[in-house]
Amino acid sequence: MALSPSLARNGSGGGASASGGAARAQEPVKDAQGASGAGRTADVPAARPEPAAGPAGRAEDPAEAARRAATTTVRGRGRARRPSGRERHDEKITVYVSAEELMDLEHARLVLRGEHGLAVDRGRVVREAISVVLADLEQRGEASILVRRLRGR
């Protein structure tokens, strides 16, 4: 979550300690557009990073350091990472469930992940379940599982 520009200037950016305040003032502060990359920076200019010391205390070439950091990051995250399929939704509803229903939903999510290799969140499980039930209602009408469950049969 990005700090608003007014919070970054007056130092009340969410509990910054005395030792961390100076470091935070040098970090760029994003505007309300978040990760667009067009955010403005704080009034204090960022400090230049010092070149990392290589073997025998020599200063390392910045390009070499960047290349090494990039390959380390790739190794740390895994090279064959697949997109999650997560998408942004514009509409929202709130649904209240019992503790047992929530546990069943979480169990289903864990089964999908562990036994089927599908890393999905609970919202995606709910959206897929709604889609399946509504398609069944459209196709089967009176004989659909939704009609039968709502009638208590």
Image (cartoon, grey):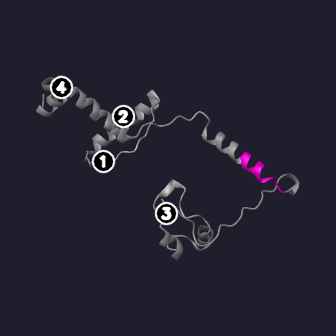
Is tag 4's residue or tag 2's residue first in the polypeptide sequence? 2
Residue 39: x %, y % from top left: 53, 61
Instruction: State yes or no: discs 4 and 2 in contact (Cβ < 8 Å).
Output: no
Q: Could you tell me which residue is drawn at 41 percent across and 31 percent down? A: 112
Q: Nearer the viewer, mark 3 or mark 4?
A: 3
Q: Nearer the viewer, mark 2 or mark 3?
A: 3
Residue 48: x %, y % from top left: 71, 64
Magenta region: which residues? 59-68
| Element class at badge 3 | loop
Q: Could you tell me which residue is drawn at 18 percent across and 25 percent down? A: 144
Mark 3: few, some, or many residues within 10 Å (few <14, many ≥20)? Answer: some
Residue to which mark 3 is pinned: 31
Residue to which mark 1 is pinned: 91
Q: Nearer the viewer, mark 4 or mark 2?
A: 4
Residue 94: x %, y % from top left: 27, 49
Asked whether, in this view, residue 152 is left or right of residue 47, the answer is left
Residue type, mark 3 in image: Asp
Residue to which mark 2 is pinned: 108
Is tag 1's residue or tag 4's residue first in the polypeptide sequence? 1
The residue nearer to you, when weighing 151 against 99, is 151
